[in-house]
């Protein structure tokens, strides 16, 4: 095998790993539709935390009432603000960042995690501007 072939295989392996790590499921994460998300949050109202993982500027376009903004970009530094003994509901714009946030939280000992499948773009409930 020549060095060009080895480089191509390594690059292909990296690309496969990158896409797998972004799109693979997160163990223990509940993927909820808009309706399921609303119902679950209502049932857990006093024992849950709703986190919007978008950047602060994105929240100006609207957010789910009661959400706390902890952007994915700063979540690692703000883990202490999130209670481990509560159900955590996550959402972002499309569902990709909230999945990444769930992966990070899972690695840091959080177990009760749910996210809004399709993000706020799929949300059918009330929004605050």
Image: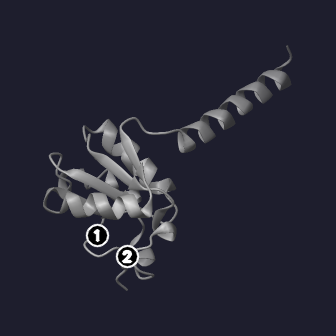
In this orientation, does residue 70 appear? no
Give the quarter of the image for residue 10: top right
Mark 2 residue element: loop
In the image, residue 92 above or below residue 12: below
Taking the view exactly as shown, the residue that stands out farthest to the top is 1
Across the whole image, how many numbered discs are drawn on residues? 2
In this view, the residue in front, 123 or 94, is 123
- Residue at 42% x, 66% y is 54
Give the quarter of the image for residue 116: bottom left
3D distance between C-alphas at marks 2 and 1? 7 Å
**Residues at circles 2 and 1 in contact by the CB criterion of under 8 Å:** yes
- Residue at 85% x, 13% y is 1
Mark 1 residue element: loop
Crowd around label 2: few <14 · some 14–19 · many ≥20 (10 Å): many
Residue 120 point in image, percent of width and height = 46, 68
Residue wearing tag 2: 63
- Residue at 41% x, 82% y is 60
Task: Please give left or right for residue 2 compared with residue 123 in the image.
Answer: right
Residue wearing tag 1: 67
Residue 81 point in image, percent of width and height = 19, 57
In this view, the residue in front, 4 or 22, is 22
Task: Please give left or right for residue 123 compared with residue 23 in the image.
Answer: left
Residue 57 point in image, percent of width and height = 43, 77
In this view, the residue in front, 69 or 128, is 128
- Residue at 45% x, 70% y is 123
């Amino acid at each position: 095998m020549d060095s060009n072939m080895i480089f191509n295989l390594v690059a292909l392996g990296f690309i496969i790993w990158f896409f797998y790590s972004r799109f693979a499921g997160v163990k223990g994460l509940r993927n909820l539709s808009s309706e399921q998300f609303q119902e679950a949050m209502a049932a857990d109202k006093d024992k849950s935390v709703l986190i919007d993982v978008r950047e602060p500027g994105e929240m100006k376009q609207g957010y789910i009432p009661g959400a706390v903004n902890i952007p994915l970009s700063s979540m690692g530094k703000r883990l202490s603000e999130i209670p481990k003994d509560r159900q955590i509901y996550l959402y972002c714009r499309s569902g990709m960042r909230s999945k990444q946030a769930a992966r990070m939280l899972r690695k840091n000992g959080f177990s009760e995690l749910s996210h809004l499948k399709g993000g706020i773009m799929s949300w059918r409930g009330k929004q605050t501007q």
